[in-house]
Structure formats: C-alpha cells, structure tokens
Amino acid sequence: MKWISLLALILMGQSILCAQNTKSMAPTIQNQDLPYREIPDYPETYAAEHVVARMVDGLGFRFYWATEGLRQEDLAFRPTPEARSSEETIDHILGLSTILLNSLKNQPNVRSGEETSPLSFEVKRKKTLETLKEASDLLKQADTKLKESTIVFQNGTAKTEFPFWNMLNGPLADALWHVGQVVSFRRSSGNPFNGKASVLTGKVRE
C-alpha cells in the first residue's frame, strides 16, 4: 500500500509541474514582443517631423511601462466615482493615438476619441503601441510633411479641420497627460510603475 501511495504522490507532482510549465509557456499578448519596451535610436537630423516622431516614441515608451503588468484591480481603479477608471483612460489614449495616425494618413476621424472600447485590455494595449509605432515610422519618412497633415473630424457631411499645430497641444499632449494618470492610479492601487524604466534615457536599467 505504501508504494501505491508513493506512486500516486509522484504522479500528482508530475501533473502539477506539467500544468505549471504549460501555463508559463502559454503565449499572451502582454508578453509578446511589443514596440516601445525601449525607445528606438533618435534620428540624425532635427527636422520638425523627426522631433515629433521622438515625442511619439517617448509617449510609446511611457505608455508601455505605465500599462505593463496591470492587474484587473488596477484597471478597475478610479480615484473618485465620477472619474475615469484606468482602463477607461487607456481607451481614451487609444482614441487619441488613432487621431494622430489618421492625421498622418490624411484620413478623417469619425469618432471623437472619447469612446470606450469593448476589446480586452491586452488587445487595446497592443493596438495603442502599434498605432504609435506606425505614426512614428510615418513621421520619419521623407515624404511626410506636417503642414499637409491636418486633423479632420467628420460627423456625417460636416467636417471640422485643424492644422497639425493643434495635434501638439491637443491629442499628443493629452495622451501624455493621461499616461501620467495611469501611472498615478496604479500606484494608488498598490502596483507602482517599474522604477527600472528610465524616461530620460528610454532604456531599462538592469
């Protein structure tokens, strides 16, 4: 009887170990190779488009680490009942990032950027980072001109247009503002920003 009990314990241990290994190997969007874990090298010239691209890269880096490792309780946190939760704030950052990309593609915005998204947090995070990376890449292309990249909001047949100047003090500055809110909120919910991520160098200290 003793050897039967011992065999059962061994088999049970192997099953638990196998389950743990399977879980650790399961791919998740949050742990995939997403852009902006570190900031890419800066351009060689200080062209206006390159300067804006660097601002976008900085936003991407800050967003990456502001949202890395968020738990469900972090996403649900809101400082007051009337305030946006962290996840709703992330929805807004995704909307603002889309406005930026649409401007560079000369495409109108049929959404205001204020809407919430039914997508999962992992998908929204991935989409935001990839949207910012695409915007930065477009800004680094020689044929991209800021004076030709306008913000267009379309509601039916009505259109409202703004020059790219308004992108700087509007959606781009707004997105940075809200990333700071996510950092503040996650600290309040007991899961602070990773201190090894240096916003000055854009690198992760080992």
Image: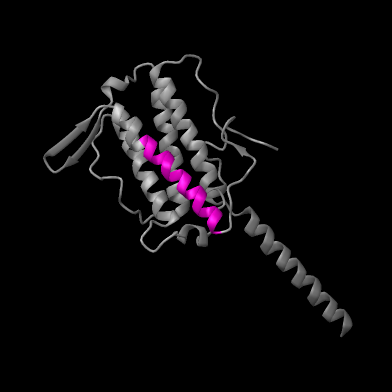
The location of residue 101, given as percent across then percent down, is 34, 34
Q: State yes or no: residue 19 in magenta.
A: no
Q: Which residue reaches farthest top?
A: 45
The location of residue 187, given as percent across then percent down, is 55, 53
Q: Quadrant of the N terminus?
A: bottom right
Please name whichever residue, 154 or 20, is drawn nearer the observer in this view of the structure: 154
Q: For the magenta stretch, what is the residue range?
A: 172-189
Q: Which residue reaches farthest left?
A: 157
Q: Which residue reaches farthest bottom?
A: 1
Figure disc tally: 0
Relative to 154, say whether 144 is above or below.
above
Write the residue at 39% across / 24% down: 139
Write the residue at 23% across / 36% down: 108
Relative to 146, say whether 18 is above or below.
below
Q: Which residue reaches farthest right?
A: 2
Q: Quadrant of residue 151?
A: top left
Please name whichever residue, 96 or 24, is drawn nearer the observer in this view of the structure: 96
Write the residue at 63% across / 43% down: 195
In-image side of 124 versus 159 (left or right) = right
Look at the image and tell me whether residue 105 can be seen: no
The location of residue 141, given as percent across then percent down, is 40, 20
What secondary structure is the magenta-colored segment mainly? helix
Q: Quadrant of the C terminus?
A: top right
Write the residue at 56% across / 40% down: 33
Look at the image and tell me whether residue 200 can be seen: yes
The location of residue 10, given as percent across then percent down, is 81, 71
Q: Quadrant of residue 81?
A: bottom left
In-image side of 152 versus 189 (left or right) = left
Colouring mode (rainbow / by chain / secondary structure / one colour): one colour
